[in-house]
Structure formats: structure tokens, C-alpha cells
Image: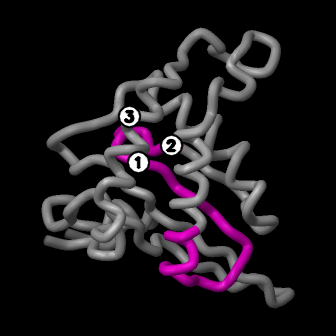
Amino acid sequence: MRTMNVESFNLDHRTVKAPFVRIADIKHLPLGDTITKYDVRFCQPNVEHLNMPAVHSIEHLFAELVRNHNDHVIDFSPMGCQTGFYLTLAEEPDVARTCSLIEATYRDILAASAVPAANEIQCGWGKNHSLEQAQSAVQAMLDKRDEWEQVTA
């Protein structure tokens, strides 16, 4: 296959073993800043996926809570395939440190009593949330915390 412009399109999704956290992209900007994008994969590609209320709620919870731990968060966005998320940070790559950040944020999600901004004023589909499904998915990923840095089987 030819090399594609989108990094994840060049990843052989048959060779990875979810859950994992991997560096998906690094950009060194002209003024010296570094942007690092991480693939935070919950589900085995083409085998399983998160349902949309879980995806939506994890997105809201993580995006809000991660900023309590790190001032360099640019974005946390879901993958269209519903198998994970992209975490983008304005900092040098460090998988171990980022895994610790993700773990701390997941623990905050497990302690949450509501999904932030899950209403029609602050969200485009405020009824499409499930705290329980989000917490279940996060707990399943935390249960395999020791495997996150191993991307391939």
C-alpha cells in the first residue's frame, strides 16, 4: 500500500493489541513548541467498539477532568471508528508520563457523579450520554493498565 497522509491510515490495525497508548504524531513548530498526539485505544480494532453514549461521555469527562492535571492539553477527541480517542498535548513526547496522566484522569472519571455539560445548552446532543457506560469502559481499560505501553501483540 502507498503511504497515506493520515498517520493512522498507515497503521496495520490487525497487528495492534488494545488497550494501548501510543504516539501517533509529533509536530515541531517553527517557534520551538512541540505538539504530541497520542492514540488512546480502548477497543481492539475491527473486533469491538464503544457505543456512542459511552464515547460521548468519556469525551466530555476526560476533556474536562484532564485539565485539572495538565495545562498543556490541546484536545481530546474521539475516533470515528469508536475504538478510542486522540489526546493532543503541547509538550515533548513521553509515553510513561502521559499514561500516568491518563490513569489519573480515568480515576477522576470513576469518581464522577455526573457527565459535565451533558445538557442542551452546553452540548449538541445532550441526551446522548451514559455515565455508567463511560465508567465501565474506563474501568476495563484501567484493569489492563500494565499493558498500555505494549502496542502490538
Q: Secondary structure at mark 1?
A: strand
> Circle 1 sits on which residue?
84
For image coordinates 54% across by 15% down, the residue present is 128
Query: Neighbour class for label 3 at 10 Å: few (<14), some, many (≥20)?
Result: some
Q: Is residue 13 left or right of residue 30?
A: left
Q: Secondary structure at mark 3?
A: helix
Q: On the image, which quarter does residue 35 sit in? A: bottom right
Establish if 70 lies above or below 129.
below
Q: CA distance from mark 2 to mark 3?
A: 17 Å
The residue beneath circle 2 is: 78
- The image shows residue 100, relative to residue 79, as above or below, that is below
Q: Quadrant of the C terminus?
A: bottom left
> How many other residues sit within 10 Å of disc 1, few (<14), some (14-19) or many (≥20)?
many
Q: Position of residue 20 (x, y in %)?
A: 34, 64
Extreme residue toward the right, this view:
31
Q: Amino acid at mark 1?
A: Gly
Q: Which mark is residue 38?
A: none
Near-viewer residue (25 or 128): 128
Question: Disc 3 and disc 1: Cα gap in Å?
Answer: 14 Å
Q: Nearer the viewer, residue 26 or 146?
A: 146
Q: Residue at x 46, y 32 (%)?
A: 134
Task: State the quadrant of the N terminus.
Answer: bottom left
Residue found at x 71% / y 79% = 91
Contact? badges 1 and 2 (CB < 8 Å):
yes
Q: Residue 136 has which mark?
A: 3
Q: Hey, which quadrant is residue 29 in on the image?
A: bottom right
Estimate the x, y position of residue 141 in percent, counting from the top left. 35, 51
